[in-house]
Image (cartoon, grey):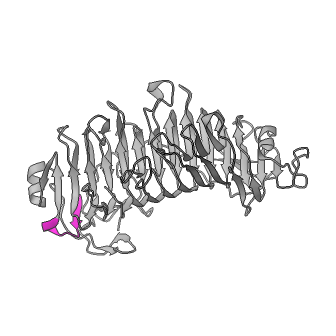
């Protein structure tokens, strides 16, 4: 897995608690704490003719943004601000970031009701070619359109820039009510539109993104020339399309060589109640992923909880001749999805595929609730040289465990040391390999030459209803896995414990 194991977790250093800093206090920049040069304040009843002090605050956030310099902090006090905010200048390594944040404990709300969408696509807060910027603790809401010509976005990062932090914001009720797949809206969007200059050293952490009406778009996506990033600890829920996306080959960057989200980490997020069913862009289709890598490369997806979505985690490409590659999905919990738990490969013969991706140590439970036949693991078109090991796959009443329904490649994936179980029992379970269905584990092994060391046995989860997907003592998952090597299994299990304890690695997302 070339280039994967050296990825940096850009938010590894501690982040200072939200505060209204004064000279001598600290703010966060690139993992280091430093005092702001000045702190300015915005509050209802303020005046942009004031000096921006705590006792004489400004009235508008945009005035504050236009006035401050590198190293300055803007503290937004409780109130509703009906304005678009554009940050188009930067902090610096030498002087520190520009910080835009809510006052601690205050509901600082930017409300888009009635506001225009400049240029046909804009954010309530937009960072345009900006570096060394922190946006923290704001509520962004009620930005909407009824036109396919306009794309409202809650928080938008575009152009190129380094050392950007988007932390602890709440983005909700961003909507398009136009019909069809030309209708688009986004909760949070990052577009790397320059080349070779990228958006890099980006951290998006601790945000809540919910109650979005999206058309053909994602709740939260990175697209184009975006590299060296972390998406960590976010909560995405109750939207009608994809939860978190990392995308490539859409023409967002001007040079195709750079047009790909890459070298990133998606870790510790919770995504739930995401479905395209009833979305006018899709009709009655279960097509919305919890986490979707569409043409990205060298990405780690680990320790996420994904449930009550359509497809749990999908690694694919929508562009012919292009692939998602060198992605590791490990130690994730995926349950109660409408369609497949994890899906590899393109959705049709005329699109792209998936290569050199690894699905390691995940726990999948009772997905494909709607009986689509896609099962716990789905392998579609143009999949090659992928690895699926050490996973628990527990099917519901439909009993579909693996559904690799195309024969367009000779080696879609290598599967082994997986633990299979089904509510349908052994007699009602199925595996499909390159278009041929098998109704027993023995037949599956013989026909597919896969899963030589994979048992069919109850994993003994602690609680199927809650669910609690840790396993009880005596589980056949304990010490039954095989570490694939090369660091692919990671160092931590879903709960943050050591990934290997006892005599060998366990099967599934938890290490007992």
Count of labels in the image: 0
Q: In this view, does 286 lie to the left or right of 446?
A: right
What is the x, y in percent for residue 171? 60, 54
Q: In this view, does 458 lie to the left or right of 125?
A: left
> For the magenta stretch, what is the residue range?
418-428
Q: In this view, does 92 lie above or below 311?
A: above
Closer to the camera, 503 or 442?
A: 442
Query: Where residue 99 sits in the image (x, y, percent)?
Result: 72, 46
Q: Could you say which is closer to the camera, residue 449 or residue 351?
A: 351
> In the picture, residue 284 is in which quadrant?
bottom left
Residue at 63 percent of width and 49 percent of height: 143
Quadrant location of the N terminus in the rendered image: top left
Name the residue located 61 percent from the left edge and 48 percent from the top edge: 144
Q: Residue at (21%, 46%) from the top-left corner? A: 414
Magenta stretch: includes residue 423: yes
User: Per the image, is 507 magenta?
Assistant: no
Q: Is residue 23 visible?
A: no
* Residue 336 relative to residue 129: left or right: left
Q: Which residue is drawn at 45% across and 51% down?
A: 241
Where 225 falls versus 402 (above or below)?
above
* Image quadrant occupied by the C terminus: bottom left
Residue 48, image quadrant: top right
User: Can see residue 101?
Assistant: yes
Question: Is 200 situated above or below 33?
Answer: above
Q: Position of residue 341 (x, y in %)?
A: 33, 56
Residue situated in front as seen by the camera: 360 or 291 = 291
Question: Residue 308 in the image: x percent, y percent?
Answer: 40, 62
């Amino acid at each position: 897995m070339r280039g994967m194991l050296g990825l940096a977790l850009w938010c590894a250093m501690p982040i200072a608690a939200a505060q209204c800093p004064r000279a001598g206090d600290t703010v966060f920049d690139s993992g280091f704490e430093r005092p702001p040069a000045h702190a300015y304040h915005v509050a209802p009843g303020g005046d942009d003719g004031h000096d921006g002090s705590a006792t004489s605050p400004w009235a508008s956030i945009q005035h504050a943004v236009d006035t401050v310099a590198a190293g300055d902090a803007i503290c937004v006090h409780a109130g509703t601000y009906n304005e678009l905010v554009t940050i188009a200048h930067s902090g610096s390594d030498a002087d520190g970031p520009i910080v835009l944040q809510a006052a601690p404990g205050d509901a600082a709300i930017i409300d888009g009701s009635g506001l225009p969408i400049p240029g046909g696509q804009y954010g309530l807060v937009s960072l345009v070619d900006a570096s060394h910027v922190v946006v923290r603790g704001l509520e962004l809401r009620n930005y909407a359109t009824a036109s396919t010509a306009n794309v409202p976005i809650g928080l938008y990062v575009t152009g190129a820039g380094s050392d950007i932090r988007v932390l602890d914001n709440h983005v909700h009720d961003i909507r398009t009510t136009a019909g069809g797949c030309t209708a688009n809206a986004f909760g949070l969007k990052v577009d790397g539109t320059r080349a070779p200059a990228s958006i890099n050293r980006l951290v998006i952490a601790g945000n809540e993104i919910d109650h979005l009406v999206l058309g053909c778009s994602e709740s939260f996506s990175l697209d184009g020339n975006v590299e060296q990033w972390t998406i960590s600890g976010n909560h995405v829920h109750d939207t009608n399309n994809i939860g978190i996306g990392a995308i490539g080959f859409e023409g967002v960057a001007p040079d195709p060589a750079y047009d790909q989200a890459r070298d990133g980490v998606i870790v510790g997020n919770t995504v739930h109640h995401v479905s395209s069913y009833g979305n006018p862009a899709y009709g009655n289709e279960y097509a919305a992923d919890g986490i979707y890598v569409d043409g990205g490369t060298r990405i780690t997806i680990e320790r996420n909880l994904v449930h009550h979505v359509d497809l749990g985690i999908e690694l694919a490409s929508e562009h012919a001749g292009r692939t998602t590659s060198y992605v590791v999905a490990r130690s994730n919990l995926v349950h109660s999805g409408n369609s497949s738990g994890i899906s590899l490969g393109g959705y049709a013969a005329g699109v792209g595929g998936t290569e050199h991706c690894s699905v390691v140590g995940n726990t999948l439970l009772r997905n494909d609730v709607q009986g689509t036949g896609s099962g716990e693991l789905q392998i579609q078109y143009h999949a090659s040289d992928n690895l699926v090991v050490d996973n628990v796959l527990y099917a519901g009443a439909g009993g579909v465990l693996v559904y690799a329904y195309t024969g367009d490649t000779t080696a879609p994936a290598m599967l082994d040391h997986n633990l299979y179980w089904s509510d349908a029992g052994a007699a009602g379970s199925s595996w499909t390999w390159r278009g041929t269905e098998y109704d027993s584990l023995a037949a599956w092994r013989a026909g597919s030459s896969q899963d030589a060391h994979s048992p069919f046995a109850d994993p003994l989860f602690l609680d199927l209803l809650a669910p609690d997907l840790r396993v009880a003592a005596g589980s056949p998952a304990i010490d039954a896995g095989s570490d694939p090597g090369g660091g692919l299994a990671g160092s931590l299990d879903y709960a943050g414990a050591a990934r290997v304890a006892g005599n060998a690695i366990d099967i599934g997302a938890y290490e007992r």
